[in-house]
Image (spheres, grey):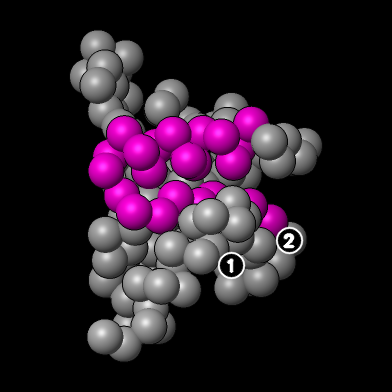
Amino acid sequence: MPAAYGNKSRATHAAASDLVAMFLDSRGLAAVANHRPTRASDAIGDIRPDVSVEGLSLNVTTRHEYRLGADLDAATDTARLSESPVGAFVRWRGDRPVEQSPVVMTLDAFAKLIRLARPS
């Protein structure tokens, strides 16, 4: 994935990823923001999601225009390449608190998430 996934500003993207990870962590989920290398040569082969949360792959976008299909495809690809069972993306909205950001995933990923959440 490119360094600033779907965003023109690396700083905005990094801050939004940090906010998402901190919010999830504050809710008792082990979440870590994965910052991208600043040099293109260091980013080659970097397939980590923007936020790793308990083994799941979560991308973050702060772009102003909606690109639901492209963002969902990128999140799904990142999950597959990082061998995460579920991939999704957060559409951060700068004018709202981070907890009001929508999370988008495929129906298949949603079913996997529910299955993973059920007690054995």
Quick one: which residue is furthest to the bottom in this view? Answer: 119
**Mark 1 surroundings within 10 Å by alpha-carbon count, few (fewer than 14), some (14 through 19), many (20 or more):** some
Quadrant including the C terminus: bottom left
Give SS at disc 2: loop
Residue underneath mark 1? 98
Residue underneath mark 2? 95
Residue at 59%, 73% (x, y): give it.
99
Q: Quadrant of residue 29?
A: bottom left
Is 97 situated above or below 76?
A: below
Name the side, left or right, on which 83 lies relative to 77: left
Residue at 31%, 49% (x, y): give it.
84
- Residue toward you, 64 or 103: 103
Q: Which mark identifies residue 53?
A: none
Q: Position of residue 39 (x, y in %)?
A: 29, 18
Name the side, left or right, on which 96 lies relative to 73: right
Is 92 situated above or below 101?
A: above
Residue at 51%, 34% (x, y): give it.
74
In the image, what residue type sits under mark 1? Val
Is 119 situated above or below 84?
A: below
- Is-magenta flag for residue 91? yes
**Mark 2 surroundings within 10 Å by alpha-carbon count, few (fewer than 14), some (14 through 19), many (20 or more):** few
Q: Position of residue 1 (x, y in %)?
A: 41, 27
Range covered by the magenta-colored residues: 70-93
Using the rendered image of the protein, determine whether residue 101 is visible from the camera's viewpoint. yes
In the image, what residue type sits under mark 2? Asp
Q: Position of residue 62 (x, y in %)?
A: 62, 44
- Residue toward you, 48 or 107: 107
Q: Position of residue 113 (x, y in %)?
A: 44, 67
